[in-house]
Amino acid sequence: MDTLLQCLEERGALNFFAAEEDIEECFKCHNEAYRMRQIRKWIYEKLADNFDVMTDLSKELRRILREKLTIYTLEVKDCVDVAEQTKKLLLETPDGYLFEVPILERRNYATVCLSTQVGCPVGCIFCASGKRFKRNLTSSEIIQSFLIAKRIVGNKLKNVVLMGMGEPLLNYSETVDFLKKLKKNCGISMRHVTLSTVGIPSKIRQLARSGVKPRLAVSLHFTSDEMRRSFMPGVRASIKDVLDAAYDYYMETSRRVSIEYILFGAGVNSTPDDAGRLVSLLRFFEDVHVNLIPYNPVPGVDLKAPGYSTIKTFANILKKAGLNVTIRWSQGKSENLACGQLAWKRGKN
Ligand code: SF4
C-alpha cells in the first residue's frame, strides 16, 4: 500500500476523473488492475461520491484513496423543478463559478444539457452565455455535471446535448476526453449525444477521426457570412467552409448532421428569401435535419422571435424543398434555461 501511495504522489494524482489514467497505471504497476474496475463501477454505475462506501476495497486502500483523491469537486448548490418536466441544477466550481445544468424529462427518458466552458468566447450578441468568457471546463467537471444529473434522474438519463454554455470545439481536448469517458464508462451511446458548434472546420474533421462520433449540430442561424459575423463576432470560418466540414463529418461518420437555425423577427433572418438561401446552402447534403428555434429572449438584448405565421412560412419553404424540419418550441423558456439563455455567475470566491 505504501508503494501505491508513493505512486499516486509521484504522478500528482489529486482528482479521480482528472487522473484516471494515472491511477489506473498505479494499480497496474501493482498487479491490481482489477481494483480500477471495482472503483469505476462504484463511481460510474453506482454513482458513489466517496471512497468509504466501496466496501469491496480494503479499509487501508479506502483510507489512501480518501486521503489522496477527491471525486467530486463541483458543489451542488440547488436543484429545483422550474417547469413541467424541467429541472435546474445549480453547480459551483472550486474557483467559485456558478452555472446551471438543465435536465429535461420525458416519461421514459431524460436529456441533460451540459456546458463545456464558463461563458463563451464566441460572443454571439443574442446569447446570455456569450456576454462574458471566463475559462474552459475540464473533462472532470463536465463528467461530474453528467453524473450529478444522473444521481437526480437515474437511469432515465439517456441523452446528452453539449448545448449549454460554451463552444465545445474551442475546448476540444477536454470535450473529447469527456466524450471518451461517457462512452467507455457510462453506457451512453454516441448516437444519443449531440455536440453543438458554430463550426470550426479543422476541429470538426479532427472530431470525425477521434474515435468518438457524437451527432453534430451546426449552429448556423444566418445565410450570409456578413450577417453571421455581425451577430456572432467570434465566428471565423465562412458558411461554405463550415458546411463543407459538416458534410465531411457526415461522410466519415455516417451520422446525420443537424442545422440549428434561430429565428429572429423583424426581418433579421426569417424572411422567405432567407429560407430560400438556406435551401440552396443545404442542397448538397443528402441527409440533414434543420431545427428551427424561435428566439428565446435574453435580458438586455433587443431581439425577438418572429410571429407564428412567419415561423410556419419559413418551415414550409424548407419542407417543400425536401428538407427534414422541426420547430423547437423550447422547454424552460420562462426560467431562462432555453437555448442561448444560460449564463454564469460569480459564487463564493
Ligand atoms: S450561442 Fe453558442 S457559440 Fe454563441 S455565444 Fe452562445 S454559447 Fe457561445
Image (spheres, rainbow, N blue to C red):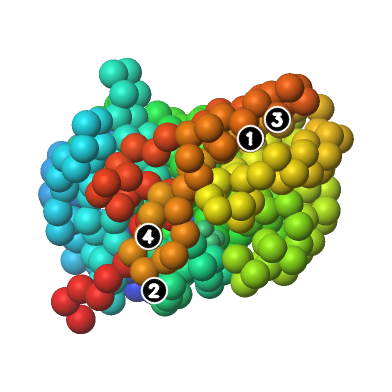
Helix, strand or loop under label 1: helix
Three-letter residue code for mark 1 = Phe
Amino acid carrying label 4: it is Val
Rounded to the nearest angstrom, the CA distance separating label 4 from label 1 is 23 Å
Q: Are marks 4 and 1 in contact (CB under 8 Å)?
A: no
In which quadrant of the rendered view does residue 319 lie?
A: top right
Left or right placement of residue 279 versus residue 313 in this view: right
Label 4: element kind = loop
Spatial distance from mark 2 to mark 4, Cα to Cα?
43 Å
Q: What is the C-alpha distance between the residues marked 1 and 2?
A: 56 Å
Q: Is residue 298 left or right of residue 148?
A: right
Residue hosting label 4: 298
Q: Which quadrant, please, contains the N terminus?
A: bottom left
Local SS, label 2: loop
In this rendering, the label closer to the viewer, 3 or 2: 3
Q: Which residue is mark 3?
A: 318
Which tag, 2 or 4, sits closer to the chain's start?
2
Q: How many marks?
A: 4
- For the C terminus, the image quarter is bottom left
Q: Are marks 1 and 3 in contact (CB under 8 Å)?
A: yes
The tag on residue 314 is 1
Label 2 amino acid? Gly
- In the rendered image, residue 162, in percent from the top left (x then y), is placed at 48, 48
Q: CA distance from mark 3 to mark 2?
A: 55 Å
Q: Would you say residue 342 is visible in this rendering?
A: yes
Q: Residue at x 18, y 56 (%)?
A: 76
Q: Which residue is mark 2?
A: 12
Measured in 3D between alpha carbons, the distance from the residue under mark 3 to the one under mark 4, in whole angstroms, is: 27 Å
**Residue located at (34% from left, 30% from top):** 110
Location of residue 87 in the rendering, given as x and y in whole percent from the top left corner: 23, 41
